[in-house]
Amino acid sequence: LKIGTSERGDRSIEDKQFRLPKYEHALVVFGGVAGIEECVDADESLKLPGAQSKALFDIWLNTCPYQASRTIRTEEAVLISLTALSAPLIRSARDTELEESSSEEDGNGVEFSDEDPSDESSEEE
């Protein structure tokens, strides 16, 4: 799951309906002072204008919709965004775990146990 953070994000973390889709790994991308858009404009290997940066991400998210200043320092944006994203990330991970455990109960999953050491274990009995 690729999440791009931008003050111009088309989704807001403050939206009561905001949910993250299922994911195995998540990547949250932050831009510099001028945002991801300027970084994309400066990258000559990308054939995409900065105004279309949102196309690089699964979610184009505004994590600080009520910011009062023109810019937020990156180190502040990281703390604000990760704090705001922590609950949705945990909720999505929990939902994924619940689905996996229900598929294991159906006999579709593989069961692992640490209760008994295997024959290959380095532990001596």
Image (cartoon, helix red, strand yellow):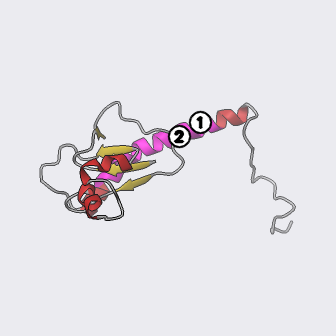
Hey, what amino acid is under mark 2? Arg
Residue sticking out furthest to the front? 47
Tags 2 and 1 touching, CB below 8 Å: yes
Q: Position of residue 100 (x, y in %)?
A: 63, 38
- Asked whether residue 17 is drawn in magenta, I would say no
Q: Which residue is mark 1?
A: 98
Hey, what amino acid is under mark 1? Leu
> On the rendered structure, is 60 left or right of 24?
left
**Residue sitting at 32 percent across and 47 percent down?**
54
Q: Position of residue 92 (x, y in %)?
A: 48, 40
**Relative to 26, does residue 19 appear above or below in the rendering?**
above
Q: Name the chief secondary structure element in magenta.
A: helix
Q: Place residue 28 in its image quadrant.
A: bottom left
**Relative to 58, does residue 120 appear above or below in the rendering?**
below
- Asked whether residue 98 is drawn in magenta, I would say yes
Q: Which residue is mark 2?
A: 94
Label 2 CA crowd tier, 10 Å (few <14, some 14–19, many 20+): few
